[in-house]
Image: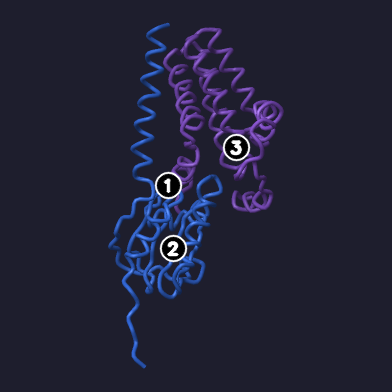
Chain colours: A purple, B blue
Amino acid sequence: MSNEAAAAEAKPKDIQIDPRGYRFGASLTLVISIIALVLGANAAGVITMGILALLFLPGATIGPQKTLQSWVFRKAIRPRIGPPSETESFRPPRFAQQMGLGFALLAVIFGALGSAPGFYIFTGFVVVASFLNSVLGFCLGCEIYLLLKRATTRAA
Amino acid sequence: MLIRLLAIAVLLGLATLAYRWWQGRQGKVRRVERPGALTPLTLGAARGPHATFVQFSTPMCAKCPPTALLLQRVAAEQPGVGHIEIDAAERLDLARELGIMRTPTTLILDSDGVVVARMDGAPSEAQAREALAAVPPPTEYAI
């Protein structure tokens, strides 16, 4: 199946989610990735990033509404703050979770291979991206998506 | 330990500065001089008789749906203004030709389909009106 056909098939199934949920998830990501940076490029840091990668996995494959973070948000936080004033498509945050998963895995791989710079660079990416998302409400993945698409698809 | 915490603080400070700079450019109206018109065939939709907002979006863009609503609202304020939304990821040919780097990016076409202004990033209502004002007023015909 061509990419276009797959995209067309996936399109009608949009799920609207509470944007505060994935911002909460991003703040957890921020805390965990900062802990990994402070622990450093050793077994403890690598294991921390490994746990983070596992937390990203459901969000990157199914969607951000299926993560442990969003479950915590639904059970513990949303009952206190009420329903959202607006909802958003699940696709941008899912793409962000895929990028997060990729960077976290790269940090784990470089860390496990003993490359400290690689571990710090990719963990640093996760820190910056989750900081922009959780604290400033800025979706880095949203901005990068088109550039990535332009770079990876050859002109017809 | 202290050095690492300091490095993290510097990293987040730089990220904040970069964010501020980027947000400052968001939705800014730029006049464009570009020869040639965008035809309804190229756009895949009919243009407004007076002016047209051509909004480039992607499915991964959280700000695109609210921007579409905002532009439709501003377009409805005066007669003859249309709004077309194009998926830039599907129309990479157009995105490349027109230098679309981020979404939403909105082009403003005059009555002939010539690009007169553009806004990169999500605009405010005031910015959308300012962009629309770049289109020369329609010529009066005496019948």
**Amino acid bearing label 1:** Arg
**Amino acid bearing label 3:** Arg
Query: Mark 2 sits on what residue?
Result: B53
**Amino acid bearing label 2:** Phe
Kindly report which numbered mark, 1 or 2, lies closer to the viewer in this rendering: 2
Q: Do tags 1 and 2 sit on the same chain?
A: yes
Label drawn at residue A11: none
How far is disc 1 from disc 2 in space, using C-alphas? 16 Å
Which subunit holds the residue at mark 2?
B
Q: Is residue B91 above or below residue B26?
A: below
Structural crowding at the residue carrying mark 1, measured as other residues with C-alpha within 10 Å and reported as few (<14), some (14–19) or many (≥20): many
Of the residues under marks 1 and 2, which one precedes in the sequence? Answer: 2
**Residue B46: image x %, image y %?**
50, 72
Label drawn at residue B102: 1
Which subunit holds the residue at mark 1?
B
Quadrant hosting residue B13:
top left
How far is disc 1 from disc 3 in space, using C-alphas? 18 Å
**Residue A23: image x %, image y %?**
56, 32
Q: Is residue B52 above or below residue A105?
A: below
**A107, A91: nearer the viewer:** A91
Tell me if label 3 and label 2 are in contact, CB under 8 Å.
no
Kindly report which numbered mark, 3 or 2, lies closer to the viewer in this rendering: 2
How far is disc 3 from disc 2 in space, using C-alphas? 29 Å
Quadrant hosting residue A63:
top right
**Residue B89: image x %, image y %?**
51, 51
- At 47% across and 27% down in the image, what residue appears? A131
Label drawn at residue A94: 3
**Residue B55: image x %, image y %?**
46, 58
* Image-based side of A25 in relation to B37, left or right: right
Quadrant hosting residue A128:
top left
- At 45% across and 46% down in the image, what residue appears? A150
Which subunit holds the residue at mark 3?
A
